[in-house]
Image: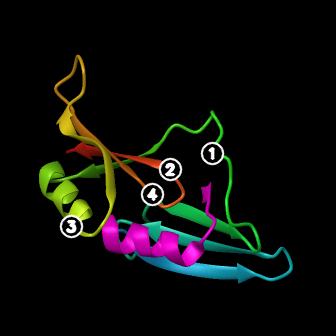
Amino acid sequence: MIRVGNLDQSIDFYTKTIGLKLVRKIDYPHGKFTLAFLSIHESDEEPFLELTYNWGVDNYELGNSFGHIALGVDDIYAVCKEIKNKGGRITREPGPMKGSKSILAFVEDPDGYKIELLQR
């Protein structure tokens, strides 16, 4: 779960730029927050990225305990090109991880969270 300052902007980024699917979105008026669940597939059985929007809070300090979200992709170069074409911010271009054969890249979401893309 990550807290976001603008839920619509974050859902737009994760669905249109990253390619996740919005599975469900639930308002909790008693607690003054909204939860949005996104997944690779439109299924309740998949792992989720949970976005929490606390009504009236438009930004957060990211802190130093959060590392990043990691997503496996089939063609990291094509995905990064598509993200760039959609206005997404690539903070590390695709390439091998130091001391490994793993190919990875990093993207930043609208709130500044890092997303690691890993070549499957």
Q: What is the distance, in whole Å, between disc 4 and disc 1 at their CAs? A: 12 Å
Q: What is the distance, in whole Å, between disc 2 and disc 1 at their CAs? A: 7 Å
Element marked by disc 2: loop
Are the residues flagged by discs 3 and 4 in contact, CB closer than 8 Å? Answer: no
What's the mark number on residue 109?
4
**Range of magenta residues:** 1-19
Q: Mark 3 points at which residue?
A: 85
Are the residues flagged by discs 2 and 4 in contact, CB closer than 8 Å? Answer: yes
Which amino acid, mark 2? Tyr
- Image location (x, y in percent) of residue 97: 24, 27
Query: At 16% across and 26% down in the image, what residue appears?
Result: 101
Q: Mark 2 points at which residue?
A: 113
- Image location (x, y in percent) of residue 80: 21, 55
Q: How crowded is mark 2: few (under 14 residues within 10 Å), some or many (20 or more)?
A: some
Q: What is the distance, in whole Å, between disc 2 and disc 3 at their CAs? A: 20 Å
Confirm whether residue 19 shows in the render. Answer: no
Which amino acid, mark 1? Leu
Q: How crowded is mark 4: few (under 14 residues within 10 Å), some or many (20 or more)?
A: some
Which amino acid, mark 3? Asn
Element marked by disc 3: helix
Q: Which of marks 2 and 1 is nearer the N terminus?
A: 1
Of circles 2 and 3, the one toward us is 3
Q: What is the distance, in whole Å, between disc 1 and disc 3 at their CAs? A: 26 Å
Query: At 13% across and 57% down in the image, what residue appears?
Result: 78
- Image location (x, y in percent) of residue 100: 21, 21
- Image location (x, y in percent) of residue 62: 62, 45
Q: Earlier in the sequence, mark 3 or mark 4?
A: 3
Q: Mark 1 points at which residue?
A: 62
Q: What is the distance, in whole Å, between disc 2 and disc 4 at their CAs? A: 5 Å
Which amino acid, mark 4? Asp
